[in-house]
Amino acid sequence: MFREKTIVYTSGTFDMFHYNHLRMINYARSLGDILIVGVSTDELVCSYKAAPIIPFNERLQIIEALKTPDMVIPQHTLDHTEIVRKLNIDAFVVGDDWYGRYDYLRDLNVQVFYFPYGTGVSSSIIKKTIHDSYEATLQEQRKAKPKVNG
């Protein structure tokens, strides 16, 4: 039944969901007939970088709310060999910040696409912007003289 269909898999943390996440998911959708999106669990993310701001179940629901994916699943590992075999994945899309990391999937007859995020928007940049803005606000509050009634 699905042999004529191209199945595409993309995955990510999708923390603080933003425009580049949406662009990558839409790009993945354009490559095939069925799109499966994996959302990294909090445990997986914490194994290689700081914990996500948005909890796993909420990130999963955000991706499920999109009209683009046909299926959204938890991602428990960065090794996609098993998921490729179980779901007959034909193509894999990931951000180019992982360039070269998933070339091994080509040995499983999977086309690998490293999506160019470009510049300007990332969860890390959003977090830094919020942090810096908050720090600046605190600095201004410390400089302000208290009002004295009387």
Image (cartoon, helix red, strand yellow):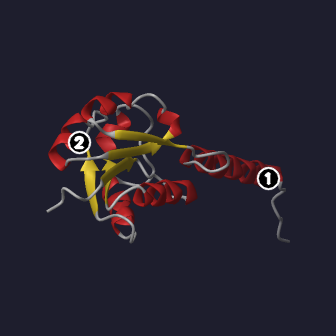
Q: Which residue is mark 2?
A: 84
Quadrant containing the N terminus is: bottom left
**Quadrant in which residue 48 is drawn:** top left
- Between residues 83 and 121, which one lies in front from this camera angle? 83
**Quadrant in which residue 107 is drawn:** top left
**In the displayed structure, does residue 140 sit left or right of residue 10?**
right
What residue appears at the point 62 percent right and 51 percent down from the top-left corner? Answer: 121
Q: Position of residue 31 (x, y in %)?
A: 41, 55
**How busy is the neighbourhood of tag 1: few (under 14 within 10 Å), some, or many (20 plus)?**
few
- Between residues 62 and 101, which one lies in front from this camera angle? 101
Q: Does residue 38 show up?
A: no
Q: Amino acid at mark 2?
A: Val
Q: Which sits earlier in the primary sequence, circle 2 or circle 1?
A: 2
Q: Position of residue 34 (x, y in %)?
A: 30, 61
Identify the element where label 1 is drawn: helix
Q: Position of residue 6 (x, y in %)?
A: 29, 55
**How busy is the neighbourhood of tag 2: few (under 14 within 10 Å), some, or many (20 plus)?**
many
Q: Which residue is mark 1?
A: 140
What residue appears at the point 33 percent right and 66 percent down from the top-left corner? Answer: 64
Tags 2 and 1 in contact by the CB under 8 Å rule?
Answer: no
* Relative height, residue 9 to residue 104 (above, below): below
What residue appears at the point 26 percent right and 59 percent down from the top-left corner? Answer: 5
Real-space Cα separation, disc 2 to disc 1, in angstroms:
52 Å
What residue appears at the point 85 percent right and 71 percent down from the top-left corner? Answer: 150
Q: Nearer the viewer, mark 2 or mark 1?
A: 2
**Number of on-image labels:** 2
- Between residues 146 and 61, which one lies in front from this camera angle? 61
Q: Does residue 71 show up?
A: yes
